[in-house]
Image: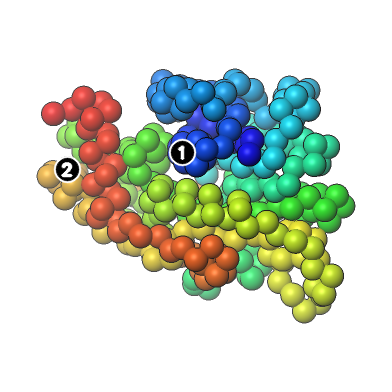
Amino acid sequence: MKYLVTGAAGFIGAKVSEVLLSLGHQVIGIDNLNDYYSVELKKARLKPLSQNSDFCFFPIDIADREAIANLFKQEQFSRVIHLAAQAGVRYSIENPLAYADSNLLGFVNILEGCRNQGVEHLVYASSSSVYGLNKKMPFSTHDSVDHPVSLYAATKKSNELMAHCYSHLYALPTTGLRFFTVYGPWGRPDMALFKFTKAILAGEPIDIYNHGNLSRDFTYIDDIVEGVIRIQDNIPSQNPDWDANNSTADRSSAPYRVLNIGNGNPVALMDYVEALEKALGRTAKKNMLPMQPGDVHATWADTQELYELVHYKPQTSVLEGVKSFVDWYLDYYHIQ
């Protein structure tokens, strides 16, 4: 089949593209290659993909309405995996308009392309950040997510609502995936693991927020991608028996659903740091700081529904995953 992967130069998008190609599919990748973080890293992710004749890359911004419409019309995609977005919780506090352009306008453009060209399944990235002020653990897609604490989270919740409209109005099958703290080789430089590794190797202190009293459902990149690849083959269908008065917001009478995709096992931040120290063979200097605006104390994914659909659970422990990242980092930056 022919796939569109948006954000193909991104951390998750590049890996998803790689796996789709290995399965014999054709992949059209797009990315605006913005400078939110290293453009060179993004280009390095694309390099091995571009050596495959079934991969074609276009430097397109999803906010460019005309370019996206033309791309859909020209390429006639079977399925779309939409991973492009302006990422980052803290950055959304400083640069809110970037999120409106990419995460809202850009998402409408993707939805319109899917509708107009009859795409058979749109899988798109939501985020665990939509759970905001929720306290009940683990986070369930059955729970209300009406109290986000960052604009980034609000745009991701908006994406879920927008997808439902298109599923309802045009019978477009959509699956939203709430990602939980993805990490691993080729990861984003703005994420904690990347920043911590760079600082520790330089002998500089690492910033530990909320004095270390945080936990995250850290999920290894290969486990995330395995879930994405499996779920895109599982297309939601209409359900005329669905009743809004006796159902949850993650399902609908339309071919629509929202799922958590995570490890299902929260890890204390300080245990994560300890795994990094072990992999590097160095002790981190720690700069203990208060809670940051837009941050949450803990995340923990209830992944039972995803497991029931695709029969897969993450396999990678934090010790294994962090070591794999460190091995990649040392090799990529030629550090002895």
Q: For the residue labelled by badge 1, is the local secondary structure a helix, a strand or a loop?
A: helix
**Image height check: is 244 above or below 47?**
below
Q: Is residue 233 visible?
A: yes
| Label 1 sits on residue | 22
Q: Residues within 10 Å of mark 1 (few under 14, many from 20)?
A: few
Residue 286 seen in the current view? no
The amino acid beneath tag 1 is Ser
Residue 60 relative to residue 282: left or right: right
Q: Are marks 1 and 2 in contact (CB under 8 Å)?
A: no
The x, y position of residue 170, in whole percent, is: 85, 50
In the rendering, at what x and y percent does residue 186 appear? 37, 35
* Front position in the image: 275 or 89: 275
Left or right relative to 324: residue 87: right
In front of the other: 90 or 63: 63
Relative height, residue 237 to residue 160 (above, below):
below
How many marks are shown on the rendered structure? Answer: 2
Q: Residue furthest right?
A: 169
Would you identify the image quadrant in which residue 94 lies? Answer: top right
Q: Residue at x 67, y 42 (%)?
A: 79
Secondary structure of the residue carrying numbered label 2: helix
Q: Is residue 65 above or below residue 188?
A: above
Q: Residue at x 13, y 44 (%)?
A: 282
* Image quarter of the N terminus: top right
Quarter that holds the C terminus: top left
Please give left or right for residue 224 compared with residue 106 in the image.
left
Please provide percent x and percent y for residue 89: 52, 44
Q: Position of residue 285 (x, y in %)?
A: 19, 44
Mark 1 to mark 2 CA distance (whole Å):
32 Å
Residue named by callout 2: 280
Which marked residue is nearer to the observer: mark 1 or mark 2?
1
Which residue lies most toward the front here?
A: 24
Q: Amino acid at mark 2?
A: Leu
